[in-house]
Amino acid sequence: MSEKFDEAAGHRHFSAACFNATWTFIDKADRSEDETEAMIHASHASLHHWRARADVTDLQLSVGYWQLSRVYSEARRGEEALRYGLLSLEAARRGALEPFYSAYAREALARAAALLGRRAEAASFLEEAREDAARVTDAESRKVLESDLSGIAL
């Protein structure tokens, strides 16, 4: 007798597991090319599983698109990073999310624009991200966000 697979449970599991696996790669100092590809695939898999969940919201979509933008920036693929940064911002706006999420979407856009050599565009996104960050009420969240913003080289 075969056991029936719980697809919803699978999506719940893999949306988080793939997201967390992606961070393992992002945090790795000396990533190989194969690990960079695995990082990208893990982030896409996370978003795929989130999108398949009945409880997905614009918050999860914004964060998932943000993570994809970040991994593409890490991989030095600016056009893809820009694309997913825009999708992150779109989801944050559509969901009327807290400024923390729009700030991180703009952080992703600033990274992508800087990577592409679009300094004025990167500076504009960075300024908008800082304006959003100033509206984040949780002090710890604002501190982490501001630290990430300060790490973007124009």
Image (tube, helix red, strand yellow):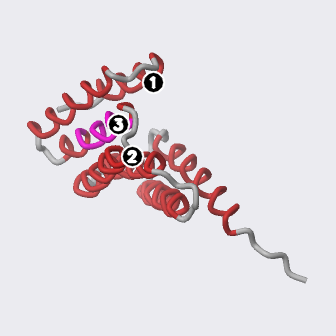
For the stretch drawn in magenta, the main secondary structure is helix
Q: Nearer the viewer, mark 3 or mark 2?
A: 2
Residue topped by disc 3: 104
Q: Earlier in the sequence, mark 1 or mark 2?
A: 2
Q: Residue at x 48, y 58 (%)?
A: 47
Residue type at the position of mark 2: Gly
Q: Nearer the viewer, mark 1 or mark 2?
A: 2
Residue type at the position of mark 1: Ser
Q: Residue at x 13, y 44 (%)?
A: 117
Question: Where is residue 100 drawn, in percent x and y?
Answer: 38, 31
Above or below, 24 against 55 in this view is above
Estimate the spatial distance between the alpha carbons at disc 3 and disc 2, rounded to whole Å: 14 Å
Disc on res. 95: 2
Magenta-colored stretch includes residue 2? no
Q: Which quadrant is home to the N terminus?
A: bottom right
Above or below, 136 against 113 in this view is above
Residues drawn in magenta: 101-110
Q: Residue at x 21, y 44 (%)?
A: 115
Estimate the spatial distance between the alpha carbons at disc 1 and disc 3, rounded to whole Å: 11 Å
Assess disc 1: are there few (<14), some (14-19) or many (≥20) residues with their C-alpha within 10 Å of its C-alpha: few
Question: Where is residue 48 drawn, in percent x and y?
Answer: 50, 63
Question: Where is residue 154 drawn, in percent x and y?
Answer: 17, 32
Question: Where is residue 27 drawn, in percent x and y?
Answer: 48, 39
Q: Secondary structure at mark 2?
A: loop
Residue type at the position of mark 3: Tyr
